[in-house]
Image (cartoon, rainbow, N blue to C red):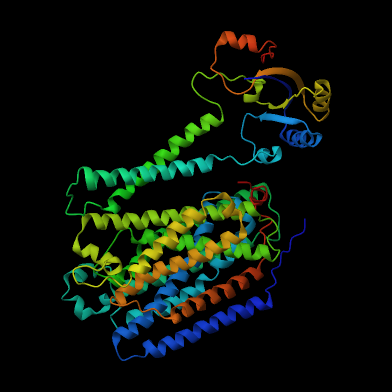
Amino acid sequence: MTFREQYAIPKRYNTLSFVLMAIGILSIVILFFTHGAHAEEKMRARFWASLLQNSVYFLLIVNASMFFIAATTLAWGGWQMSFRRVTEAISACVPVMGVITFIILMAVVFGGDHTIYHWTDTEHVKHDHILLGKSGFLNKTFFTVWTVITLAGWSYLGWKIRRMSRSIDDKSLTLEEGKKFIWDNTVWTAIYAFLFALTVLSSIPWFWLMSIDAHWYSTMFSWYTFASSFVAGVALITLFVVFLKNNNYLELTNKEHVHDLGKFVFAFSIFWTYLWFSQFMLIWYANIPEETIYFKMRMQPARDGMPASPYRVIFFLNLIINFLAPLLILMKRGSKRSYGVITMMCVLIIFGHWLDFYQMVMPGVSPNKVPFMLADFGIALFFVGLIMFLTVRALAKAPMIPKNHPFIKESIIHHT
Amino acid sequence: MAIKKFVVGCFDEEQVLFSAVKNVRKAGYKIHDVYTPMPIHGLDAAMGLRDTSLHTAGFIYGITGTTVAFSFITWVFTTDWPMNIGGKPFFSLPAWIPIMFELTVLFAAVGMVLTFCYLCQLAPFVKKDHFHPRSTDDLFVMAIECTEKTNEDEVAAFLQNIGAMEVSTQYKETGWWMGRYDRETKLFGKQVEAVS
């Protein structure tokens, strides 16, 4: 069997990604002039909040791809080997996306405005005993240093793991070399998983997202964010796999692999709901004002003359798209094996979790009105175009199939 | 139930079994079942078995569980015995979701186990007879059902030809029946030799 090993980037694909990025840049410029350059601090915050939401969301979903590699490698999985280069290519977006996110975060933290991160207002923190108590953690120095370590760590370890995977492209391994190769991979992905636990699974969502509502805290928050980004990340992998299959690449990948990716999307949608609900129910049950404020801003119905929260529709739409739709549609075996249905669901889920991040970020900036503009979608399109562009560039650099990997046979005979 | 005649072929290799299944189906014989010591991936597809409807049954049991939990708790806490718990409304859905979830799982799990037992004709005191005792150890056993038109010698020769290492003709009662050992000896007149 001969493989099409070298990916040739279609011209129209590249044009499309540039068009998307152009729309995105146009949206950023428009939003900058309507809000970003505004004299009022609230309006400026809305511009930065949109950038923050989009950059953090898309960074976390491309990074989820590396976590997918780490998790499958540590579990000694072989089934994903036929499309492993796709996950590697997506994770190659992390350094660029990381730099963009870093610039935006630094602009928000050191920009002089305090609407998004009001813990950056040192004068205010002195009189606020809750923020004073958190100031050992929530301060500009710790935020910056930890963000740099995180982004550098993700980028370096991702680069290292990708390079190890490419190092066996030209030679077939003996049994001993194969064992050593698997062991080295296990060690490096374990280091990555450790860093991932310290960052995405704990501190990073606290810093980047939860500190927008600085008085409020939830220990479930990071897991919930992780579940959100991981399910969207697997959906992104599935989209690329289906796209490449439709272009006659990835000869070793078939419906069995897409079925398993579909299972991942289905299972992690349920996992996301589980975490979402665990966070919600404990706060609802205890009914302590400083905790319920988070949900009051997002789902309060109209009562006693007070208007309903403007985010109520988004709040419930979020549950419908991210829980009910995958539960009912992806439950059937046939829908996980159908390229059409799985593509539609993956697009829907990526949008749904984008909406989830939207309602994490925006109520803290604009509590009385949903500041929704088409430009928000436009900024999302910029990152979509960027991911499309960077991923295929990374894909074209290496053979499409790691044919010398010791576990490749497991992927060829894979059967669900 | 009716007692039927079967031609039974034993195979000791997976590859041989797969091509044998294909050949038997091509020749037009009716495979009653293939008994294997362990699950073999792809054998169901090779035999042309349809997908099990156990999933659908599970889904129906699951939503039955959800509905039962939801309606019962609603009735208890709003009509039968309203209680003030922490000042919450009587109808407070978030608190019930864990119980609705648990009853969904319980109904689906128990229902599916019972359905599985029914579909596989398993129950306490139901006796099952093996076509070959080694089908639980190291042999793949294929049973071909004979109709009145089937020439059993021809089938036996065919099986031998496609790689069966052992062929026999046996009479079995299909379906399930409550086992009594005296009945069993009457039924299985022709004994299959035990493994030494």
Left or right placement of residue A230 versus residue B20 in this view: left
State the residue in front, A358 or A390: A358
Task: Give x and y (percent) for residue A5.
Answer: 71, 64
State the residue in front, B161 or B27: B27
Number of labels in the image equals 0
Vertical comparison of B21 with A187: above or below: above
Left or right placement of residue B72 versus residue B59 in this view: left
Residue at the spot x=53%, y=71% of the render? Answer: A93
Residue A154 in view here: no
Quadrant for residue A117, please give it: bottom left
Residue at the spot x=40%, y=39% of the render? Answer: B106
Left or right placement of residue B51 versus residue A313 in this view: right
Residue at the spot x=41%, y=72% of the render? Answer: A148
Residue B90 in view here: yes
Task: Give x and y (percent) for residue B162.
Answer: 81, 30
Residue at the spot x=48%, y=41% of the render? Answer: B58
Vertical comparison of A155 with B35: above or below: below
Task: Give x and y (percent) for residue A265.
Answer: 50, 57
Vertical comparison of A91 with B24: above or below: below
Placement of the N terminus of chain A among the 4 image quadrants: bottom right
State the residue in front, A59 or B131: B131
Vertical comparison of B191 with B83: above or below: above
Task: Give x and y (percent) for residue A269.
Answer: 45, 56
